[in-house]
Image (spheres, helix red, strand yellow):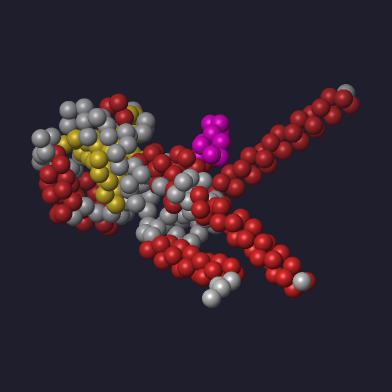
Amino acid sequence: MKVSLLKIISFCLVIFTIVVFFIALNIDNRYSTENIVGKKIDNFKIKFLSHDQTFENKDLSNDKYNLINVWASWCLPCKKEHPILMELSKEKNINLIGINFKDKKNNANKFLKDLGNPYNIILSDKDGISSISFGVFGVPETILVNTKQIIIKKFIGPLDTNDYKNILSIIHEK
Amino acid sequence: MKNKFLIIILLIFNIKLNANENTGVDTKIFKNLRCLVCQGQTIAESNSDFAQTIKIVVRDKISQGSNEKEIYEFLSEKYGEWIVYKPKFNYLNSFLWISPYIVLILGGYLIFKYFRKRRQ
């Protein structure tokens, strides 16, 4: 039986369309952190919350892990993750850097006064522009940077006990 | 005096033209960037906090002399290629770019063949 070329092509096109739809519908299009993890941290210059001097990437600790946490006093999930940060602040080989995001200085200070200050360094990104360098699109977000200034983990949303255990296992890894 | 006046007018017009040109580039970029915190909106359409920040960053980059491609590369590096609506041509999506042309050529061939058969 002779099968016409038109039928073969039509059949192939139908199969192709099904395959394309099947693959495309199964792709996870949500924002992922895979692009930033494994890369060296970008050059940044952010003002301190308490004074006008700036903190740069070269000021990051070279003998400890740096945990950069982006937070704001108006952010409820930040309150939720705060006890985790307080626990992490007890660890010796981690340097906690808090970037106060689009916030008022008074509100930020009140937040830390009420809930405790887990940070070694507190910076202020009033307009949110500097946080773009860390791929931040909301608060809270946390980035774990190793001693070579390579981003090894990024946490979107509030840190939970699993993240806490994960961070501990990384920083205690020999 | 007349000449000076003419030069001033031309200068103002030129500055205005440049300003318009700059606005055009940033709007073009905003329209091709996805608002990651919105439902199917571009950065140009969205009034979200994230979109406003990205707009400032894009304008800063333009004023620093970055071109469209460099801005897309910078943002893709931070947020992944997902932030750009028009996908970059690479080996993974090359078929996506080429397939319309293949379909067009194939379709043309089939139509040509069909009409030739009918004529015979």
Q: Nearer the viewer, residue B95 or A70?
A: B95
Q: Residue at x 25, y 44 (%)?
A: A153
Q: Position of residue A67 (x, y in %)?
A: 22, 40
Magenta part, dominant SS: helix
Q: Total number of numbered labels?
A: 0
Q: Residue furthest bottom?
A: A1
Q: Position of residue B91 (x, y in %)?
A: 46, 46
Residue B69 drawn in magenta: yes
Q: Is residue A128 left or right of residue A94?
A: right
Q: Position of residue B1 (x, y in %)?
A: 88, 23
Q: Position of residue B67 (x, y in %)?
A: 56, 36
Question: Is A3 above or below relative to B53?
Answer: below
Q: Nearer the viewer, residue A87 or B6?
A: A87
Q: Is residue B52 visible?
A: no
State the extent of the magenta-drawn residues as a range: B60-71
Question: Is A21 above or below relative to A168?
Answer: below
Which quarter shows the C terminus of chain A? top left
Residue A22 drawn in magenta: no
Q: Is residue A158 visible?
A: yes
Q: Is residue A158 left or right of residue A173?
A: right
Q: Residue at x 41, y 66 (%)?
A: A22
Q: Residue furthest front?
A: A1
User: Splitting the image into 4 quarters, where does residue A9 fall?
Assistant: bottom right
User: Splitting the image into 4 quarters, where does residue A99 fall?
Assistant: top left
Q: Residue at x 24, y 29 (%)?
A: A148
Q: Residue at x 11, y 38 (%)?
A: A173
